[in-house]
Amino acid sequence: MSIWSHCTARRRGQPGKTRLVSVVVALLLMTLSLKVNADPLRLLFLISKPSADYVAVMDTVRRGLEKTLPGQFKVSVEFVSRQNDSDLQPESNDLIVTIGTAAADTAYRQIANSQDLSLPILSVLITESSFSALAKRYFGSDEGAFVRHISSVFIDQPVDRSIRLAKLLLPAAKKTSVMLGPSSAGQQARIAKIIDKTGMESEFVSIGASDNPIHKIEPALSRSDVFIPVPDSRLINLATAKWILHLSYRHKVPVIAFSRTYLRAGALAAVFSSPDNVAKQTLELVSQIILSPEHQGRAYEPEYYSIHFNYSVAASLKVPLREEQFYRQRLDGE
């Protein structure tokens, strides 16, 4: 068994956590490898736009590399909103980290137009649905993108964390309604099994781009003890959020959401990927992907997560809240 068999990397849907020991071993191996080569590795951060969250991820990863592997990387930064495709020269890099969907789009298009170019790419701050859409557009499928050494860390948190958090917050809940869209509809059977394991019944609402959300959401939400929207396309997310929160308030049914924005607007709780969460996993993966081809061409679920609560909503719904660590220990322990 090679030393890399001990480094935990996750394909889509596979459980597991990157162990600290594995990361340390990876970094040490990389350091020894780099000493043989006098030239630093060339790392390009391709960023969709200079927004606070995107820049925070890049800055955190860059500082982490400088701290753990000083002088081993030559880092450059490009913003998609400030450069033309012709200015980007992917072949002059050893690894491209794309931050945001527009950056991934730009990088994939260039790689697809150069059939001879084989360059590892790690895409972060991208949803599963966006990654799949881009992979299909430029490479025919997710697997086609993986063959071209493209990896991604989805920003979407696994829905099982939201389901288990719902049961921890509302132990008396008997029925959970889940909203799906076109991109997430295929998850229904798997989600139903997860809900069943918690001892709750499930009901599903499927929303299409042409549907009237309020007509489909209200009947299910009104019959439920908790409502969980699953992130889908941006169009579906925007079209349904205001109605879900409006109906939640009307029927006094708590919502477990997938973003800070949802939480601030009226959800009871949210499980989401913060910039720090994304940066931490990106830093771990950069060294693994450059050093070992077996870590290239994969879709990674988010390893780390944040939990926040809306205390005003909790008080209104009379939901008692405990400290965050109580919920985190139980989520991590299962």
Image: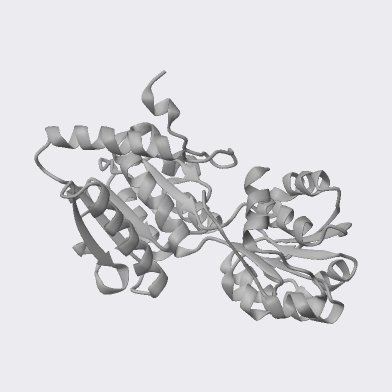
Lateral position of residue 281 relative to residue 210, left or right: left
Residue situated in front as seen by the camera: 241 or 27: 27
Q: In which quadrant is the C terminus drawn?
A: top right
* Residue 85, horizontal then vertical, whole percent: 26, 64
Q: Is residue 200 left or right of residue 71?
A: right
The image quarter containing residue 3 is top left
- For image coordinates 78% across by 56% down, the residue present is 167
Question: Horizontally, is 296 left or right of 133 in the view?
Answer: left
Q: Residue at x 52, y 52 (%)?
A: 304
Quarter residue 197 falls in = top right
Q: Is residue 243 visible?
A: no
Above or below 218: residue 280: above
Quadrant of the frame with the N terminus: top left
Evaluate whether residue 300 shows in this view: yes
Q: How many marks?
A: 0
Image position, residue 241 (x, y; %): 67, 75
